[in-house]
Image: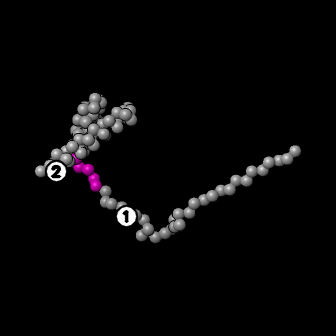
Amino acid sequence: MKKSTTTTTKTTRSSGSSSSSSSSAQPKSTPSVQPTAHGRDTLERFKMEAASEVGVQLKNGYNGNLTSKQAGAIGGQMVKKMIDSYKKGNKS
């Protein structure tokens, strides 16, 4: 009886740079912007308004029970309103 042998070859990728390269090769990070309490409140009201417009009931605080479809509808409505607001503000 003949025995079959399979050889597996492991391939590794090299990015061309070592992990000990200088920090100049790292992308520059942008400074983080900390939201203000007023900004958070405004965004929260905006989110509640958009949710109401698409028929999703949100509660104050964590809304982890939302489906992806509901969360996407809220986010999509927010984007739509932002675009409409931008277009309205740029009309002469």
Q: Position of residue 51 (x, y in %)?
A: 27, 34
Q: Which of label 1 and label 2 is nearer to you?
A: 2
The residue that appears at 49% across and 69% down in the rendered structure is 21
> Disc 2 residue type?
Asn
Pick the front one: 27 or 77: 77
Pick the front one: 61 or 30: 30
Distance in Å between CA atoms under marks 1 and 2: 33 Å
Q: Quadrant of the N terminus?
A: top right
User: Magenta segment, which residues?
Assistant: 33-39
Q: Position of residue 64 (x, y in %)?
A: 37, 35
Find disc 1 in the rendering and name its residue.
Answer: 28
Magenta run includes residue 34: yes
Q: Secondary structure at mark 1?
A: loop
Q: Secondary structure at mark 2?
A: loop
Pick the front one: 7 or 38: 7
Q: Quadrant of residue 65?
A: top left
Is residue 59 in view from this perspective?
Answer: no
Q: Is residue 37 left or right of residue 92?
A: right
